[in-house]
Image: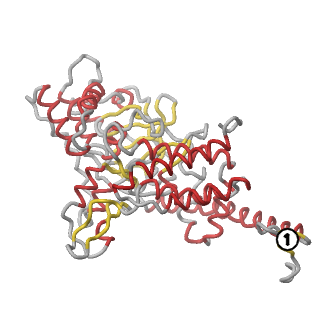
Amino acid sequence: MFPAHGEFTVQKGGRFVGRSIVFTEHLLFIQLYLLSTYFLWSSVLSSWESTTKSRHIPCYMCCGNKCSSELPSPLHSRRVTNSACGCDQYKKGIISGSTCADLCDDHTLAFQQCLSSSPTQQVYGGLWKGRAVIIKCGIQEAFKAENNPDSTPRRELVLFDKPTRGTSMDEFREMLLNFLKSNLGDQTSLATLVSQIITMADVNRDGKVSLAEAKSIWALLQLNEFLLMLSLHEKEHTSKLLGHCGDLYLTEKTPHRSLYGTEIPRFLRPLLPSPLHRLIHQWLAPAWPRRAKIAIGLLEFVEEIFHGTYGTFYICETSFKSVGYNDKYDFKMVDLREVATETAVRTFLRGRRCERNADCTFGRDCTASCDRLLKQCKGDLIQPNLAKVCALLQDYLLSGSPADLREELQKQLRTCTTLSGLASQMEVHHSLVLNNLKTLLWKKISNTKYS
């Protein structure tokens, strides 16, 4: 039995003396018991889920304008018939890309497992010339689906019908420039991005862009994540784009696809109480200095997408599942589908009718204020990227933090989470808060093996 109330003496900071050793042993035993139970049931239920999903839940292959369900489960592993991924169109000369030959001729690009059972989220693990990669293709964007609830998945979205035969190189450049202006805003640097896109499209490096090459790159640009990967390709905190074929593209694989290193399986989450969620996360998380390094990378990413080379971007779903890190504990944004351009958010809000703030939400949590008198959405978001990221980092950084740092760290994170999205505060105040937090963390881990 636990000691009765009053048998402990409590010192400042909540540390027990007297019979604290007995209490600590009991607590440690409970933690070990709960964690061993979690891993046992995780293994059993994982096996059960794999069996049931392979029978009932299809994993749709919808690259290009073809659809099949050859991969039956997110946990099942089998090579996909390449004709389902545009190889027929490649052989007919309709599409092109830097990895088409690897996929269709040499078979050095292979699908291994499906990572999503949703027909609107095409994500696969694969091998490319012996290297582990992530393979993606999209038939409908998450933002388009969420912001247009009445829409239904369109499995023939990518028709590769633009540009049309007879389009000159100058006309194609103009097409690209106008498209980028409408999506990224009228940035002075867009001409450089157009040149980079044309270089990427020119797969055979002959200085020209064929119709198949132009159609493929145009189809890819319609995918929000691909557009953002091109816009942020100079940044070290996004996954590298490795190649493409038609509307299919490859990125490097981030080994740890969650800030905590390992995510609790989705089917287990409803069965576990919140305190156990936190305990498991804390148990599986990297050591605190490594968490500090990862957090610095996330803060740098927030800095990079605010008034970057090609405009400002908003994180419209802030969650552990979108962010991760590599084996060197460098932060990586593993999913850019929930990141939106400022132009897209402002276009959505402009003139939008509303009754409450929730009516002014783009994506999951890019929310602006509703003007109750005019019944229209305002232009500024209530919470900026930095405030949302700091809220995400609170438990992550405070748990297990050094005692001499905890009070100041808690104070700075609290200040950060209360930041406003008003334009008048965005420039100087946000930069000051971000730099103070980065400096605090960096001072603690600099000149150590963790830096």
Q: Quadrant of residue 279?
A: bottom right
Q: Nearer the viewer, residue 328 or 163?
A: 328
Q: Which residue is mark 1?
A: 23
Q: Quadrant of the C terminus?
A: top right
Q: Element under label 1?
A: helix
Q: Quadrant of the N terminus?
A: bottom right
**Residue lying farthest to the right in this orientation:** 18
Q: Nearer the viewer, residue 438 or 130?
A: 438
Q: Nearer the viewer, residue 56 or 228?
A: 228
Q: Is residue 236 left or right of residue 158?
A: right
Amino acid type at image mark 1: Phe
Residue at x-position 20% and y-position 35%: 215
Give residue 29's position: percent from left, percent from top.
81, 66
Q: Look at the picture and state if 332 lies above or below 366.
A: above
Give residue 357's position: percent from left, percent from top.
32, 71
Q: Is residue 156 left or right of residue 115?
A: left
Q: Nearer the viewer, residue 436 or 52?
A: 436
Callout 1 crowding tier (Cα within 10 Å): few <14, some 14–19, many ≥20: some
